[in-house]
Image (cartoon, rainbow, N blue to C red):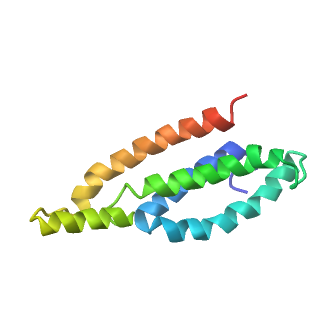
Amino acid sequence: TVTEGHLFLTAIIILWGAAILSAIVDNIPLVIAMIPMVKSIIPSFAASMGMAVTDPAVHTRIEAPLFWALALGACLGGNGTLIGASANVVVAQIAKRNRYKLSFMDFSRYGLPFMVGSLVVSTGYLYLRYFTN
């Protein structure tokens, strides 16, 4: 409803939404929760494009861009904050053990711009890979 059936806009909302959520919660539970949502919208897009859900073209034209958006968003969003990915917490603990304090804000000062830059590149990739003829 929000995207009014625009597949590219849906993919971008999934990409950026998953990234923002992944910066706040761990990415694995996020992806597990998002997969059923993505699967549930595929038949609607297939019907609007005049394809049967069993049509092999559904995979390349609908499923692939939506699931790549989810994968990229969840993965790259974890770079935004200290709690966004388990590896970030491990690095902070290693830094602490070596007497280097790495605060949430210190990490986010570098992580958030990197996350946004990565998402901009991912947006371009999704567009060029799946939405140009």
Side of 115 where 6 appears, left or right: right
Residue 3: x and y, percent? 69, 50
Split into 4 quadrants, where in the image is the C terminus? top right
Q: Is residue 16 visible?
A: no
Determine the image quadrant of residue 127: top right
Residue 63: x and y, percent? 72, 51
Q: Is residue 34 visible?
A: yes
Q: Residue at x 69, y 60 (%)?
A: 38
Determine the image quadrant of residue 80: bottom left
Residue 31: x and y, percent? 56, 65
Side of 58 where 81 appears, left or right: left
Side of 100 where 94 appears, left or right: right
Which one is nearer the viewer's eye here, 41 or 6?
A: 41
**Does 8 appear above or below 74?**
above
Which residue, as the protein is rendered here, is positioned at the far left?
99
Q: Residue at x 75, y 44 (%)?
A: 60
Q: Residue at x 48, y 38 (%)?
A: 121
Total tally of numbered discs in the picture: 0
Split into 4 quadrants, where in the image is the N terminus? bottom right
Q: Residue at x 66, y 51 (%)?
A: 66
